[in-house]
Image (tube, rainbow, N blue to C red):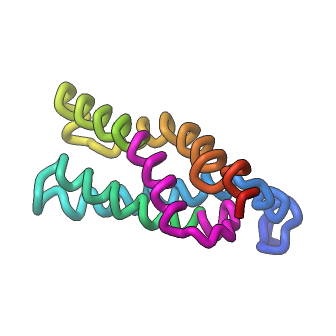
Amino acid sequence: MALITNDSPTIKKLFNYAPIRFLFIGCFGFAMNTILLYALWPLIGLLPARIIAYILVVSMTWILNRHVTFHSKDRHRVTQWLRYLLVYLCSGALNITTFALLTQHFYYLHQHPILPLAFIAVVVATFNYVFSNHFAFKLPFLQKAE
């Protein structure tokens, strides 16, 4: 007897909510970010690895959020990508600056960068969802003009 199956009405209802889908994609992004960071760190250093991993993960999550979370039909993909990128550059500035400060000022966090990664992920998740939802993927005043 399985407690949770793919046919579970509770699971289906849960995934009807865009914030839940956004959260799952964010968790995937966090996992990919962590894998990329640890893979690149020995090759190019901690901060350059963090920046490259971040850029790659933003690209992956845009594709997933466009299709899975927000079901975007916007034909102006480049414009949408630029709006999404702007949201993530703003949160990225906060993200990377906080990461750099924490890992440069706390030896323990430098040795265990997953801790500041997790902290930062929680802090910027809400910012990213709100601005992705209302700016990157939905601009009602612009969509009426199409």
Asked if residue 54 is positioned above or below residue 99 in the image, the reply reads: below
Determine the image quadrant of residue 42. bottom left
The chief SS type of the magenta part is helix
- The residue positioned 59% from the left and 62% from the top of the image is 65
Q: Is residue 63 left or right of residue 114?
A: right
| Residue at screen point 41% across, 40% down | 90
Where is residue 110 drawn, in percent x and y?
20, 38
Within the magenta stretch, is there residue 44? no
Residue 66 in which image quadrant: bottom right
Judge from the rendering whether residue 10 lies leftward or rightward of residue 90; answer left or right. Answer: right
> What residue appears at the point 23 percent right and 64 percent down from the top-left corner?
39
Quarter of the figure with the C terminus: bottom right
Tell which of 81 and 91 is nearer to you: 81
Residue at the (28%, 43%) spot, across then down? 113
Locate the N terminus by quadrant. bottom right
In front of the other: 66 or 32: 66
Front position in the image: 144 or 66: 144
Left/right placement of residue 136 relative to residue 89 reads right
Image x and y of residue 50, in percent: 26, 51
* Residue 33 locus on image (x, y percent): 37, 57
Callout count: 0
As drawn, 73 above or below 23:
below
Q: Horizontal and vertical percent for residue 26?
A: 53, 54
Magenta segment range?
66-90
Whether residue 120 sits left or right of residue 140 in the image: it is left
Specify the farthest residue to the front: 145
